[in-house]
Amino acid sequence: KAGVTQTPRYLIKTRGQQVTLSCSPISGHRSVSWYQQTPGQGLQFLFEYFSETQRNKGNFPGRFSGRQFSNSRSEMNVSTLELGDSALYLCASSSSGPSGRLTDTQYFGPGTRLTVL
Amino acid sequence: AQSVSQHNHHVILSEAASLELGCNYSYGGTVNLFWYVQYPGQHLQLLLKYFSGDPLVKGIKGFEAEFIKSKFSFNLRKPSVQWSDTAEYFCAGVSGGYNKLIFGAGTRLAVHP
């Protein structure tokens, strides 16, 4: 089975711009979660999608948004970029079911490294 | 607030030394715990997980962890490390079954030949 894939792998943007990151989960996985990894804050949960619906959300401002498509692929968008948004953005997928409870492991992709200048 | 803490931020060992990395969690209810590893330049990989049952769980590459409910701990162990174990190790938890991971700050392990 192919793993979680993320595109692009690297991005450079300037302050004020917006960015869209893409994630393709493992085949058959319907849950997709997003995490931000920075040296200062570590790994932080952004949000989780299941069947095109956001089920869980972390403590990030509204500039961070996402969506999921019918084929379970997901995108996250960051608008009005700030220098502090520079980070590695990780996507993870799992075979979690519709109840919103973690029933299986989350598998991580390689991440998209975003640099904001 | 729910949290997962890792007390050792940097650990340096020689090959064949034993390893124990500490992890504590601070939430109640149903507890699901994980250890992930991030090798240099690679993505996060699952080492092992605890959902229920035997509190001593065995993972890949000779790693094991013990869930001690009374101590709110889930320490990672390996009896003899190798140079290839050089990586960053993350403890993570899911509280109450909500489908999001709370990560510890990570422990950078350097193993010298």
Image (cartoon, grey):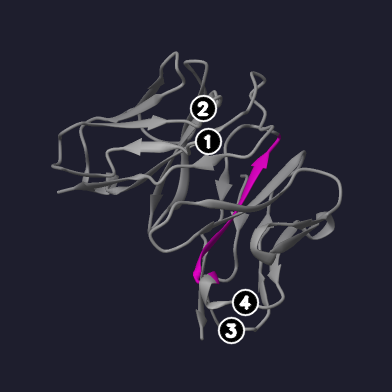
Label 2 near label 1: C-beta < 8 Å?
yes
Label 3 near label 2: C-beta < 8 Å?
no
Q: Quadrant of residue A105?
A: top right
Identity, as a three-letter code, of the amino acid under mark 2: Ser
In magenta segment, residue A54: no
Q: Please name which of the two marks, 4 or 2, marks the residue nearer to the observer.
A: 2
Q: CA distance from mark 1 to mark 4?
A: 30 Å
Q: Residue at x 47, y 15 (%)?
A: A52
Tell me the crowding category of disc 1: few under 14, some 14 to 19, or many 20 or more residues within 10 angstroms, Cα based: few
Label 3 near label 1: C-beta < 8 Å?
no
Asked if A113 appears above or below B87 in the picture, the reply is above
Going from N to C along the chain, the mark reached first, 1 or 2, is: 1
**At which x and y percent is residue A26?**
50, 32
Residue B15 tag number: 3
Q: CA distance from mark 1 to mark 3?
A: 34 Å
Q: Please name which of the two marks, 1 or 4, marks the residue nearer to the observer.
A: 1
Going from N to C along the chain, the mark reached first, 4 or 3, is: 3
- Which region of the structure is painted magenta? B85-96
Q: Secondary structure beneath disc 3? A: loop
Q: Is residue A9 left or right of residue B72?
A: left
Q: Residue at x 15, y 35 (%)?
A: A16
Q: Quadrant of residue B70?
A: bottom right
Residue B81 tag number: 4
Q: Please name which of the two marks, 1 or 2, marks the residue nearer to the observer.
A: 1
Chief secondary structure of the magenta span?
A: strand
Identity, as a three-letter code, of the amino acid under mark 1: Lys
Q: Are marks 4 and 3 on the same chain?
A: yes
Q: CA distance from mark 4 to mark 2?
A: 34 Å
User: What residue sits right under mark 2 in the picture?
Assistant: A27
Give the position of the N terminus of chain B as an image quadrant.
Answer: top right
Q: CA distance from mark 2 to mark 3?
A: 39 Å
User: What residue sits right under mark 1 in the picture?
Assistant: A1
